[in-house]
Amino acid sequence: MTHSPSADRVRSLFDRIAPVYDDFNDWLSFGQHRIWKQMAVKWCGAKPGDTALDLCCGSGDLALRVADAVGREGTVYGVDFSASLLDIARLRSLRSSPPPPIFWLEGDALNLPFEDEKFDAATMGYGLRNLSDIPRGLQELYRVLKPGASAAILDFHRPRSPAMQAFQNWYLETWVVPTAARFGLTEEYAYIRPSVERFPCGAEQVQLAGDAGFSHAVHYPISGGMMGVLVVTKSKSYPS
């Protein structure tokens, strides 16, 4: 497995924040991330018995929700390149009795260790923004989805409204970074604002999804446009 220097930096960052990652998500989103993740699970279309993928699964919060959707007869693969976050994900899943049907794998979103057309549904939470090659990541996601399958990709988003843009900047600079600083994680969380500024907006994400081969793509802005869910669907049939 190979990574670019920027990918290695991101992986190192998530390894460092792993011990407080879940608590930070709760504090920094005021608990709203749970609602956003449940929306992603619904929009990916995962149903009982499906084989599903949670890409950039982190500490496993979204994968566990997908596991609820596919049930005991289904299977979920949680993939991340942070070994520390995967360790937390494994421990979380073991708390359930019996443990949910999830396989946790260390892997590269730009070179997924799966055959073509394996998955009935997929999710990704706060991962697309951190890929060193977003078009390649979408192409890999397209490759491993079955015809007719959908994926829901949750991430930060730049609001269209100037007022909401100003609020987002204020929120990141006066709430996120200072909160992180109390835990000695200023550098680790200061990266969020520049990463959001570089991240393609919703319309650009839709275009990139089309370029990757998806027949249908819709970006849903949520939380005043500060978050968004890109829902993509692979055609049931191939062009002749």
Image: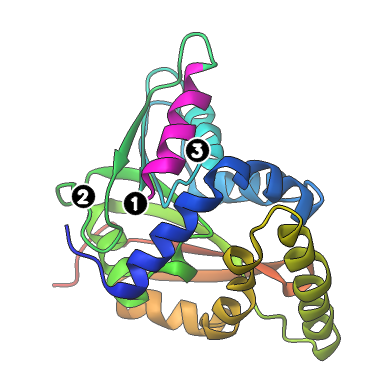
**Mark 2 Cα-neighbour bin, 10 Å: few <14, some 14–19, many ≥20:** some
Secondary structure, mark 1, is loop
Would you say residue 37 sits in the magenta stretch? Answer: no
First in residue order: circle 2 vs circle 3:
3
> Which region shows up in magenta?
82-94
Residue type marked 3: Gly
Q: Main secondary structure of the magenta part?
A: helix
For residue 224, side relative to residue 57 (left or right): right
Which labelled disc corresponds to residue 81?
1
Say which of marks 2 and 3 sits in front: 3
The label nearer to you, 3 versus 1, is 1
Element on which disc 2 rests:
loop
Along the polypeptide, which appears first: circle 3 or circle 1?
3
Amino acid carrying label 2: it is Glu
Q: Residue 60: give its label.
A: 3
Q: Position of residue 192 (x, y in %)?
A: 61, 71
Q: Nearer the viewer, residue 164 or 188?
A: 188
Query: In this image, 35 relative to 94: left or right?
Result: right
Q: Nearer the viewer's eye, disc 2 or disc 1?
A: 1
Query: What amino acid is found at the position of numbered circle 1 in the picture?
Result: Phe
